[in-house]
Amino acid sequence: MKLSPSLHSKLCSRPVQSLMKPLPALAVVALLSACSSSLSRLSCIDEPKSRSTEVWSNNSRPIKINIGVDGSGSMHGYVTDHGTRFAQAIDTVSALVAAQGLTGQTSFWRLGSNLSINKPQKISETQFLDARTQEFFCTATDSKYPCVTSTLGQLLEIPIAAPQDRLDVLLTDLEPDSGAISTLAKRYSQLIKSYPNYKIVLLGVRSQFNGTIYPAQSGAFRPFPYSTKTLPLESKGRPFYVLLSGPSSAVDAFSEAFENMPMGVSKALQASVFTSSGHSEETISLDSSATWGVQINKDCLSETSAFDRKVPSIPSQWLLGSVESACLGRPFDIQLKSLASNRLPTSSIPLSEIRLFPETSGYRLISSSIYDGRLVVGLKSNPKLLSSTDPIAVQVSNQALNSALWSDWDSSVSNPSGHTTQNLRLFVNSLQAISSGSAERPAIKLCLAIEPTTQQLGQSKRPPILIFIVVGAILLVGAIAAALINSDANED
């Protein structure tokens, strides 16, 4: 028996003693049973852990922020023209630091090494803005910035604060000299294993570029020129990356602020998240407002607010409906659409990487696409299993999502191209392998529950007598409500 929200609030909040006065004992028992059953909940995704209120501090200790720019020559092509997305990223980071009031706890660094330099060079914020210009990347012998090769791990070795008290921000093309990527991944591995709630976010952006592509492995190929001037930027732009690492609350705050800055670069991001065992990234869930309005078989399906006398604990995570009896003998289609997220690829996620739970449900996957920043999954019902009323979930693991997210961005040293990054997936996979927190919950989970209408109950697991029980219970609740209202009137 299911009570309306208003009736539930009026009746179930009363003490048992106050019910005994106007109602017989049998009615009280029935009412308490109804109150108890109405608490039954459908759960799709657990509520994410609340974020720490201390964002830029840790136990009153200010979070130190290190912002480093890869100063190697392979970065030069991002700034040969003005106003590139890479230049916008430099402006965005600088504006973000000022807007968040973080100038006093932020240090800027130029990363790289040569025969005489083996440590990161500390620079001012004004010099950091020089990373929008060609001279920052040593284009001439008289440049005020020395020529260096990439040694990205330098940023994490700066002895400025303990790992739990610092946020490291790295801007790079992720194509350093041989061995530097493995060194960086190894250091990240140590940090994510040693500190609870440690998080790494990889933001990728395709930018304008007009320069030279160098081999990440010495001698693997001859350097070659690459220009995006006549190419579509969203598919052939040269990738660069912003790597954030540190306490999850600080990483989240910086990442969200970066994405929300009113700059073009902020609208062109892809993101992967890697976490320690003490933190799980929020799962991408159903966009219920965008889902039901595009259903294909409206003559077969109707929306409901409950399923099998259960109410969703978080209604927005569920698509709930009922099937008309006329649709029993033929299959129908369902379309599920996720919330928009920059953790989704621009191309589709292969159907082979999408899982349906339980696998023996009355539905099968038939399509997958990315539209307007959302994952759109198509399902088809199986008429033979249509009477099954078990809820189902469409899931994508973090590993599968990351694989799809960066597949078009990756290349090997034996097959390089200007619009890809050499050995990117090797780096991403190494982070995925150490990210125990990311394995605790799926990256995407879309929940669906559709039950037969009352005309179909004879074919379901419920006995026909249940109809009479439900009707009787409804009549009983009506009598109880009337008695209580009269009781209240008499007391007044």
Image (cartoon, rainbow, N blue to C red):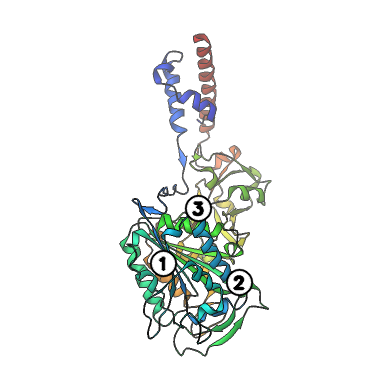
Residue 408 in sight: no
Which mark sits nearer the N-terminus, 3 or 2? 2
| Contact flag, marks 3 and 2 (Cβ < 8 Å) | no
Out of 448 and 128, give the one closest to the viewer. 128
Element under disc 2: loop
| Residue 396 image offset from top left, x and y in percent | 49, 60
**Mark carried by residue 393:** 3
Query: What residue is disc 2 on?
Result: 84
Out of 241 and 396, give the one closest to the viewer. 241
Residue 450 in sight: yes
Q: Residue at 54% of width from left, 39% of height from top?
A: 306
Amino acid residing under circle 3: Ala
| Residue 43 image offset from top left, x and y in percent | 46, 45
Element under disc 1: helix
On screen, 419 above or below 451? below
| Label 2 neighbour load within 10 Å: few <14, some 14-19, many 20+ | some
Q: Residue at 33% of width from left, 51% of height from top?
A: 59
Q: Residue at 43% of width from left, 82% of height from top?
A: 177
| Residue 152 image offset from top left, x and y in percent | 41, 75
Q: CA distance from mark 2 to mark 1?
A: 30 Å
Query: What residue is disc 1 on?
Result: 432
Amino acid residing under circle 2: Thr
Q: CA distance from mark 3 to mark 2?
A: 42 Å
Could you tell whether 47 is left or right of 318 in the image? left
On screen, 398 above or below 491? below
Amino acid residing under circle 1: Gln
In front: label 3 or label 1: 1
Which mark sits nearer the N-terminus, 2 or 1? 2
In front: label 2 or label 1: 2
